[in-house]
Amino acid sequence: MPSSLTRNALLRLRDPALKGRWIAFVGSGSSTEELAIESITAVFNKTPSRSRFYGGITWDFPEMSSTDAISMTFYETYDYKTTAWLREWHRLIFDPNTSIYGLPADYYRNIQVNMYGTESSSAPVAELELIGCWPTDISPYDYNYHELDGRLIITCTFAVNTMTFKLV
């Protein structure tokens, strides 16, 4: 590791990751939905530590590993299919008309999010797989005149059992 930042050291740095396009594939087989993502907040697994006193010394040990909720923002389509699809999925968890909760086997789904670079959009440059997901919170619509393009966005928070991230 160089002690000073020289011009040659700067020239050897890798280019930054530029923004790309994110596409989410939810479900499997013929029931796969393909959604364009405006933004995604993806978090990695957390494994906090817990101190325990043993043998006259305090030791740190790992606690339960978990993945926090992941938030995705979608642009609504002209026919409101994004909202309809999310609400239908959310109704599998809890149906407000019948007050019945669903089974995890019915509403757990995997989401594969592919990032396509702005230079070459034929193959993904990164893949994020969210395993055992279900929507926990769907945001309300924000109707206002502040958005110049007039597009509606919908944000959904997903509970995730685990996730994998790989560069392609």
Image (cartoon, grey):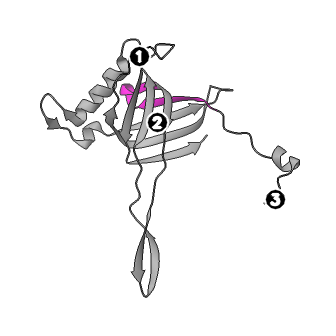
Magenta stretch: give its range.
19-35
Q: Distance from label 3 to label 2 (Cα)?
A: 39 Å
Nearer to me, 5 or 89: 5
The residue under label 3 is: 2
* Image mark for residue 144: 1
Q: Distance from label 2 to label 1 (Cα)?
A: 32 Å
Residue 29 lies within the magenta run = yes
The residue under label 2 is: 112
Total labels drawn: 3
Compared to residue 151, the image places residue 104 above or below, namely below
- Would you identify the image quadrant in which residue 85 lies? top left
Look at label 1 and name its amino acid: Asn
Q: Distance from label 3 to label 1 (Cα)?
A: 52 Å
The quarter in which the C terminus is drawn is top right
| Residue appearing at x 41%, y 58% in the figure | 65
Q: Residue furthest bottom?
A: 56
Task: Return the x and y of residue 13 as percentages of the image width and height.
Answer: 78, 46
Q: Earlier in the sequence, mark 2 or mark 1?
A: 2
Task: Return the x and y of residue 15 as percentages of the image width and height.
Answer: 74, 39
Q: Earlier in the sequence, mark 3 or mark 2?
A: 3
Q: Are marks 3 and 1 in contact (CB under 8 Å)?
A: no
Mark whose residue sits in front, 3 or 2:
3
* Image mark for residue 31: none
